Image (tube, rainbow, N blue to C red):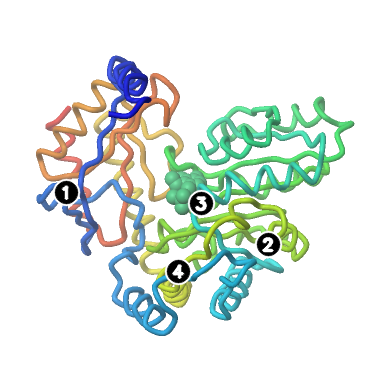
Amino acid sequence: MTRLDPFLTQALARIDTAGQRRTLRPAHLEAAGRIVREGRILVDFSSNDYLGLARHPELSARAIAWTQRLGTGSGASRLVTGTSAEQLALEARIARFKHTEAALVFASGWQANATVIPALLAAVPGCMVFTDRLIHASMHAGLASAGVRQVRFRHNDLDHLDTLLESKGREAPARLILTESVFSMDGDRADLARLADIAQRHEAALYVDEAHATGVLGPGGAGLTGDVPGRIDLVMGTFSKALGGFGAYVAGSRVLIDYLVNAASGFIFTTAPPPAVLGAIDAALDLVPSMDAERTHLADLGERLREGLGALGLDCGASSTQIVPAVIGPEAETLALSARLDAAGFLVSAIRPPTVPPGSSRLRIALRAAHSPDDIDALLTALKDAL
Ligand code: PMP
């Protein structure tokens, strides 16, 4: 019992009453699109290991090789003694992959967004920030710690953004637009070419989170920003999803990266990533450019699933990627469906507020390249029964 426990117990009771209490349940990824959860093997439609790289032998082999050569820990933060030659070479590789001048690795995507955004805003006092309504919590964390007010535009509504840029902050020293290329809970895409045109016309800077596009979309899996090279000021993405590992990158101009090395707290005050993590990323970057067959297969599975969900009368929103929501609405109903699917052998996450707006609870179906068309059909049958 600690002194804070009575307060925490009350806070938990409030979460409970709101029906929003979460608990941790043990699970680990298997190959072939399966997951072991609490001892049961389920077809995994929940994790973000889209390309199956988290169980790829080349990633584990390189993680082990780099560990044996360089150790289990990096020993210090990057600016102290934690920068290995391998780390610098890897960042040069990431910059080539993203067609930018430079790149910087962060310990996680959350840490990148939460600390890069305030670092940027510290350099530009009075910068006005325009955000898509559905940007990830980590970007909100960055904005909150910067203490800036954001101007929100309706999700993926670029006419709305255009109008707001026309009327707001024209006197500001700079304006910054934050969005995602693939939205994590909706699986729809931002129109980056049009966004870049709008940003250019209004002389605004553009920050794009490619967490769910990296590896899966764009030329050679380089993400959707790969379709608009040189037109995005800052691209971030993660190694924790399609790349099967851990950590994140920020890619952009040399000046941007040099500045972040000197200003992003989540870079400066944290220990450098361990060799195992870097080795796995290095191996993933060897494989990803040539995984077009997996990317096409994922796209086909997405089409098949959306068609099937449509036939069941379910709303998939504007999904056009490997993330397919089936929007149910009420939380309790969504949780009940997820539980019935679990009983039938399918792990499909129920996503509810505060992760998504109230009234839009959904099953978030995440596809893995290891799934077969039969897996999709079996899921659809189970969902039909569950409904
Ligand atoms: N951005 C988006 C859009 C995400 O979905 C996530 C992961 N949920 C992150 C950032 C955070 O990345 P990480 O899991 O590597 O911290």
Would you say the beta carbon of the disc 3 residue lies within 8 angstroms of ligand 1? Answer: yes
Disc 4: which residue: 274
In percent of width and height, residue 41 lies at 12, 53
- Residue 320 makes an appearance in the image: no
Q: Amino acid at mark 2?
A: Pro
Mark 3 secondary-structure assignment: helix
Numbered label attached to residue 229? 2
Q: Amino acid at mark 3?
A: Gly
Q: Amino acid at mark 4?
A: Pro
Q: CA distance from mark 4 to mark 1?
A: 27 Å
Residue placed at 69% from the left, 57% from the top?
260
**10 Å crowding of disc 3: few (<14), some (14-19), many (20+):** many
Which quarter of the picture shows residue 95?
A: bottom right
Q: CA distance from mark 2 to mark 1?
A: 41 Å
* For residue 113, side relative to residue 327 (left or right): right
Would you say the beta carbon of the disc 4 residue lies within 8 angstroms of ligand 1? Answer: no
Compared to 335, does 288 lie above or below?
below
Disc 3: which residue: 109
Q: Nearer the viewer, mark 2 or mark 1?
A: 1
Q: CA distance from mark 2 to mark 3?
A: 22 Å
Residue placed at 69% from the left, 61% from the top?
261
**10 Å crowding of disc 4: few (<14), some (14-19), many (20+):** many
